[in-house]
Amino acid sequence: MMQRTLESQQSMQLGQISGSLSFNGHLTKEDEEMSKSALSTFRAKEEEIEKKKMEVKEKVQAQLGRIEEETKRLAVIREELDALSDPMKKEVSGVRKKIDSINKELKPLGQTCQKKEREYKEALEAFNDKNKEKVQLITRLMELVSESERMRLKKLEELSKNIETIHIA
């Protein structure tokens, strides 16, 4: 009778446990739902961030392309201005120098973006790996707890049988 009660409690606990540990060391359905909700929210945010990141990256690439085209156009204009000996030559030269300077600044910024993107992907992969490891450890913990309870119940039954076989006269 005692074994059936403990087994039914154990099966109820195992049914409720499958995601994360609550404060008392047992997994609850609420904890599981919170973990699933948090995970789905996290995934949705990650997808949203990834989408926005790609949009920004495309915009940056488009801007870089336009800047190169504009630089070429300005070089042509500068040559034409040089040929005319225009009084605006000095100002055009200053603008050209600023554009060249910006182009030089853009290259390391693009490299920094790519580096940060790689670091982000590595950090995300490490996070996902640790999360998988946590889930595996929780599963192993539940197996160990279940096995321990089963062994203790078996020992209790043996002790109970031993007590029943002892006859005190």
Image (cartoon, rainbow, N blue to C red):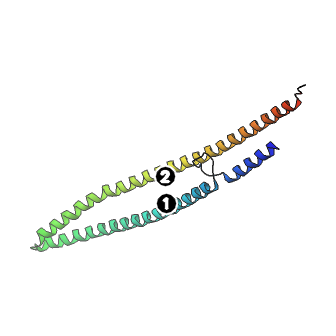
Q: Nearer the viewer, residue 14 or 49?
A: 14
Q: Position of residue 135 (x, y in %)?
A: 60, 48
Percent across and percent down for residue 47 are 50, 63
- SS state under label 2: helix
Picture coordinates of residue 53 (x, y %)?
A: 42, 63
- Callout 2 environment at 10 Å: few (<14), some (14 to 19), or many (20+)? few
Q: Quadrant of residue 29?
A: bottom right
Q: Are marks 2 and 1 in contact (CB under 8 Å)?
A: yes
The correct choice, above or below, for 13 with respect to 54 in the image is above
Q: Amino acid under label 2?
A: Leu
- In screen coordinates, is 7 left or right of 126? right
Q: CA distance from mark 2 to mark 1?
A: 10 Å
Q: Secondary structure at mark 1?
A: helix
Dividing the picture into quarters, in which one does residue 31 lie?
bottom right
Residue under numbered circle 1: 46
Q: Is residue 83 left or right of residue 20?
A: left
Give the residue drawn at x 43%, y 65%: 52
Q: Which residue is mark 2?
A: 124
Q: Residue at x 63, y 47 (%)?
A: 26
Q: Which of the labelled discs sits on residue 111, or is there none? A: none
Q: Check the image and report above or below for 89 versus 106.
A: below
